[in-house]
Image (cartoon, rainbow, N blue to C red):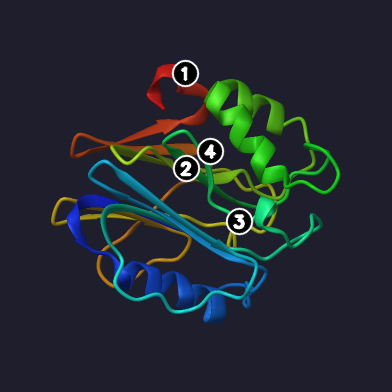
Amino acid sequence: MLLSIGKYSDLTRYMDFVYDMANDGKHAPHHDGFGYVVYSKNEITVHKSIDPIKKVEGIYGNTLLAHARKKSSSGKTLINTQPFLAGNVSFAHNGTIKGLGKKGKSDSYYYFKMVLKGFPAAVTTIRESDFTSANFLITDGTYAAAYREARKEPGYYSLFYQLEDERFTVSTEPMNGKWFEVEDRTLVVFRNGKVSEYKADEVVPEVI
């Protein structure tokens, strides 16, 4: 998964990188559906498919959130395909959270609903569950946030971020250039051109 936010520009290369990760990255292939959300001025474009990820040309906007799915248990349906959108907020999660939500629906969707109600409480609840990773990306097109917490396979459930030419990008794997790894149990927030890092247990609800 990948989230990039900045000035209006051609975002195709970021989508290309998601394609590359899905086909050749960690634990590839991720071929159980893909989706992306593009924020452009006052418009939000959403695309989802249960098919394996394809090359997408000509993506222009300010913000892109993209995800390629490798399903664990819930079905291969559009309902379970990420990113999820509620109002103008989009969300993507990597990992499995057992016992969360209803049978047949994605645990990631219910995790999204919990985060919307409040990040600190969501993380506290997740920690009481059997989960592999609580990693997520979230944006409303004006800010971006990324959280990393891996209980299993920390080398796989990674997150890296970059701030270059006033564009903030966070991804499960780094692209070219200088990137910083998000530490475990850490929330990274990009807002008004500034990157801030918070330890999970120090986050107050108003941060995201």
Front: mark 4 or 2:
2
Percent position (x, y) of residue 99?
A: 83, 39
Residue 202, compared with residue 142, is above or below; it is: above
The disc placed on residue 55 is: none
Which residue corresponds to the image point at 72% horizontal and 59% vertical from the top-left? 77
Q: Is residue 67 visible?
A: no
**How far is the residue under mark 3 from the one under mark 4?**
11 Å
- Residue drawn at (47%, 18%) of the image: 205
Nearer the observer: mark 2 or 3; the answer is 2
Q: Which residue is mark 3?
A: 154
**Whole-number angstrom distance, CA of label 1 to CA of label 2:** 18 Å
In this rendering, the answer to whether 185 lies above or below 12 is above
Within-10-Å neighbours for mark 2: few <14, some 14–19, many 20+: many
Secondary structure beneath dot 3 equals: loop
The amino acid at mark 2 is: Ser
Which residue is label 1 attached to? 205
Residue at horizontal 74%, vertical 44%? 97
- View extreme (left): residue: 165
| Residue sitting nearer the eye, 154 or 117 | 117
Disc 3 residue type? Pro
Against 49, is 116 above or below? above
> Reading the chain from its start, which is encountered first: label 2 or label 3?
2
| Residue at image mark 4 | 185
| Distance in Å between CA atoms under marks 1 and 3 | 26 Å
Residue picked out by circle 2: 90
**Amino acid, disc 1:** Pro
